[in-house]
Structure formats: structure tokens, C-alpha cells
Image: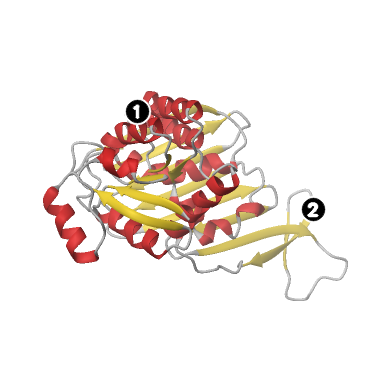
Amino acid sequence: MLKVGVLGAGHLGKIHLRLLQESKKYELIGFYDPSEENAKKVALEFGYTSFSSIASLIDAVDVVDIVTPTLSHFDCAKQSIEKGRHIFIEKPITKTVLEAEAIKTLASQYHVQGQVGHVERFNPSFTAVKEMIDNPMFIESHRLAEFNPRGTDVPVVLDLMIHDIDIILSVINSKVKTVHASGVAVISDTPDIANARIEFENGCVANLTASRISMKNMRKTRFFQKDAYISVNFLSKESEVVKMKEVPKNPDEFAMILQNAEGVKKQIYFENPAIENNNAILDELESFSDAIQTNSTPVVTLSQGAEALRVAQMIIDCF
């Protein structure tokens, strides 16, 4: 079992602590939180060992799970890597693209593994259809959330939209060509609602909307590709696949058949893939353990985390 320690015991940090404690692939050694009051409270309430400094925690583990505010990601990762520790780092990977590139370089230099916490990659509604997504040419994504003061220290692009940026980059085998975007600050000092249009070199277009001031929650992405439409509801954990195929010689009398202007007929098929219930955060943490133990590529690499941040910054730069 890998010895693991958590940096940051806030809302998400406590979830990581609980799951790592339950995991059969890690031995939870303890945590560090800069707030002495919060550290004492968490240690007393849950029985986790609280370390007095980042350095002392790093020295005691094999893997450092960084769940601190984004502003401190770089310093925490740098200290961990320079001690030869593998790092799991929450999204966004760092505050700036330059910091992300530096982390990539350091990890390579010290021969350690790193994974970024883009948890939607492990959402069962996405994993159920990922292999069916084949060269989509139009993608539409909506990620809407009710207002929550937590996370408003960064633009909504880094808080919410970056989830969908990463998902889209993971299925598009092409470089970003251009980005157009607009954002509005309503409650916070940074944009609370934003829309972005990303055009890729292969002709694919992705239209993304993110809001943290909505009246309802929504996390849905739709992929349009040749003869297929795939809908992924990350919130309700449901997927739908609509495929069009050549009409058989003897179609069923209830079959849905479309005919275009050229007279070509296609039959529509509906699929609702089976969704296996899971804990996406536990899955991403344990997948990182597997990558370390087998010396294989993590599901979400540091390079992928850096690229998601780069595209997010391109969007922010449009505001």
C-alpha cells in the first residue's frame, strides 16, 4: 500500500481524507492544514493525524494529495516533487500556465508520477459512452450551478467550465485553432457566467456555457458526430446515444426512418447505456495508485491538466 498524505482539510479535502481512509490501495498517514483551528477540529472529529508543517507531512508519505486553494498548488507540488513524492493535484493544476509547465518539468526531472483531479473523467455517464465518441464535429456543453461563495476567488471558467474543457480536449484529437468568449461578473469580482466557442484545426466546434448564478443545477454535454448524437448528463448520471444506420431490407413497422432531400433513408436507433454506480473521486484516487504501482500513464496527466488550463486562460483572456 502507498502511504498518502493530504494537504488541505477544507470541504473537498475532508472528502479526500475519508475516501483515502476507506481505500484498500492507500495507507492514510495524515494531513496538513494551515489553519491551526481547523486542523485541530478535523483531527478531533475524525481521528486523522494532523502534521505541523507541509514538509513534515511530505517526509512521511509516498504520495501527496494536494487539495489546497489553487494559489498554493504550485508551491505544494514543487516541495513534494523535489522530495521525490508522487502528486495528485486538484484542478486547476496551478494558477498559471507557466507554473503548470514548471510542474511538468519538475515531475519529469525527479521521475515522479502526477495526476490532475479532473473528476468528470470518472463520471459513469461519461465512461459508459466514451468509446462511442468518434470524431465529433460539434459539441455543446452547459454547466450551471446555484450560487456558492466557495470557489468565487477564481473566474467561473476555472471554477466550473474547466471540467468541460478537459472532457472536450480528451475526445478531440486536434489542436485548438481559435477561441471566442465573453463573461460577466454579476456577484463576484470575476466573471460568474461565461460562454466560449472553441474551434479546432480539424473543423470541430465546441460551444461551452458555465454559470454559478443559476436558479437550477445542470451539467450536460452533447456530442454530434457522423450518424450519431451522444448526450451525457454528468449530474443525473445518465447517457443517451442516438444512432442512424442504413435501413434494413425489412424494417420493423414501428421503426423510425428518416429520408433526406437526396432520398437516402436512415433508421434511428436509441440506446441508453447501462450506468454503473461509482464514487468518481475514489476511482480517480485509486486509478492514480494503479498508475504508480504499474508505472503506467495516469488517466489525467499533468500535461493534460496544463493544456486544460491553457485553453481556460485563452477563454479568460477574451473577457
- Residue found at x 18% / y 36%: 189
Indicate left or right for 79 with 261 as reference.
left
Residue 177 vs 193, above or below: the answer is above
Residue 99 vs 238, above or below: the answer is above
**Which of these two is toward me, 21 or 152?**
21
The picture quadrant where one finds residue 186 is top left
User: Is the C terminus in the top left, top right, bottom left or bottom right quadrant?
Assistant: top left
What colour-coding does the image apply?
Answer: secondary structure
Tell me which label, 2 or 1, sits earlier in the chain. 1
Residue type indicated by callout 2: Val
Q: Residue tagged by mark 2? A: 264
Residue 23: percent from left, percent from top: 44, 62
Q: Is residue 234 visible?
A: no
Residue type indicated by callout 1: Thr
Q: Residue furthest right?
A: 249
**Which of these two is toward me, 11 or 76?**
76
* Contact between labelled residues 1 and 2, with CB atoms less than 8 Å apart: no
Q: Residue tagged by mark 1? A: 96
Residue 266: percent from left, percent from top: 76, 58
Q: Residue furthest left?
A: 37
- Residue found at x 51% / y 32%: 111
Calculate the distance from the C-alpha at mark 2 to the C-alpha at mark 1.
Answer: 51 Å
Q: Secondary structure at mark 1?
A: loop
Indicate left or right for 220 with 246 as reference.
left
Q: Is residue 50 visible?
A: yes
**Which of these two is toward me, 273 or 297?**
297
- Residue found at x 38% / y 33%: 83
